[in-house]
Amino acid sequence: MDTERIDPNSPKSIKDIVGNSDIWSDIARKIDSKACPHTIICGPSGTGKSSFIKAAIMEKGYMYMMHNCIADSGLRDVRDAIRSFARGGVDGRGHHRWVILEHADSLTADTQAFLRRLLETASGSTRFIFEVRESGAISEPILSRCSLCNIEAPSYIEIRYEVLRRTNHEIPIDQAERIAQESCGNVRIAINQALAIWRTSVENIGCGLATIEEQWARRPAPSTGSEYGIWACNTIRILRKQGADPRAMMRMKMGTDTQALRILSQWNRPGGASGRALWLAAMCGEST
């Protein structure tokens, strides 16, 4: 797909990434100076983690291997390839090889033990980057061998500016304001909505806060815990279909209904939760 035609103002360099400019610049400087350790980049969805990796490593011609861990949390199909690649030497310029693991918080415990050994044996020529949303899913042995970089969601002002920049200031300011407010810190959602408005002149794109409030009001009463699974499934499906991040609902409703949030978080895991996991979460809510 020709992304230049869809979004001609997409980030071309690290300076174009919205928010956390000091952190991105510091990591990029260490990469270029061959002084970057194994790194865990932790932050919410839509904060520029993938854009940074593309600008700092992929676009500069460094040797890299990338794998999305959601589809293969055990790395069953690529373990040998990762091991072989990581044990290779540095490139002709003396730069490290890079193994990039997206959504690494879905890795199994056995897989993390395999990677821990590689972090030690291949550290002479290879560096690992773990892209995660929750650092708590990474084992302590890996955390102790990596530099942890926590990325915060960009501010409302930063997102509004980026929406206007990416659309060449051709959408009304009130629509840019609304998009920035309803994105809940997710730049990807904000830009997708802005580009849809820019290209199709649609006035009402996406779901945002109104749909979140509507779905939250439909949650079952606390005494009907067995119905929470159906509600959670439908809620996540509706939010994702309309381009919203279900984690925004969890952040907004933190501390209001622990039973509902527990089941939502189960269902929002990569691949979804099993029926038994949802049933157990509902039963735990009833027992409390």
Image (cartoon, rainbow, N blue to C red):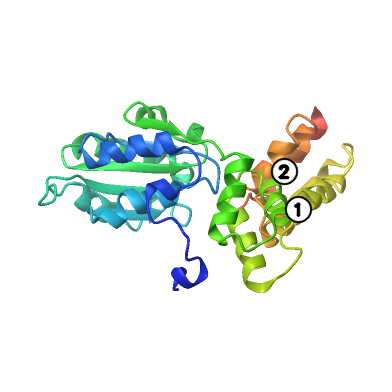
Q: Amino acid at mark 2?
A: Met
Q: Residue at x 57, y 62 (%)?
A: 167
Q: Quadrant of the C terminus?
A: top right
Residue 42 percent across, percent down from the top left: 47, 37
Residue on which disc 2 sits: 249
Q: Nearer the viewer, residue 51 or 218?
A: 51
Q: Nearer the viewer, residue 46 or 39?
A: 46
Q: Give the label on residue 39, or none.
A: none
- Real-space CA distance between mark 1 and mark 2, rounded to the nearest whole angstrom: 10 Å
Q: Is residue 186 visible?
A: no
Q: Are marks 1 and 2 in contact (CB under 8 Å)?
A: yes
Q: Is residue 50 left or right of residue 249?
A: left
Q: Residue furthest left?
A: 92
Give the side of residue 22 with respect to residue 122, left or right: right
Screen quadrant of the N terminus: bottom left
Corner quadrant of residue 108: top left
Task: Write the residue at 66% across / 44% down.
Answer: 184
Query: 60 or 163: nearer the eye?
Result: 163
* Element carrying mark 1: helix
Name the disc covering residue 235, or none. 1
Q: Amino acid at mark 1?
A: Thr
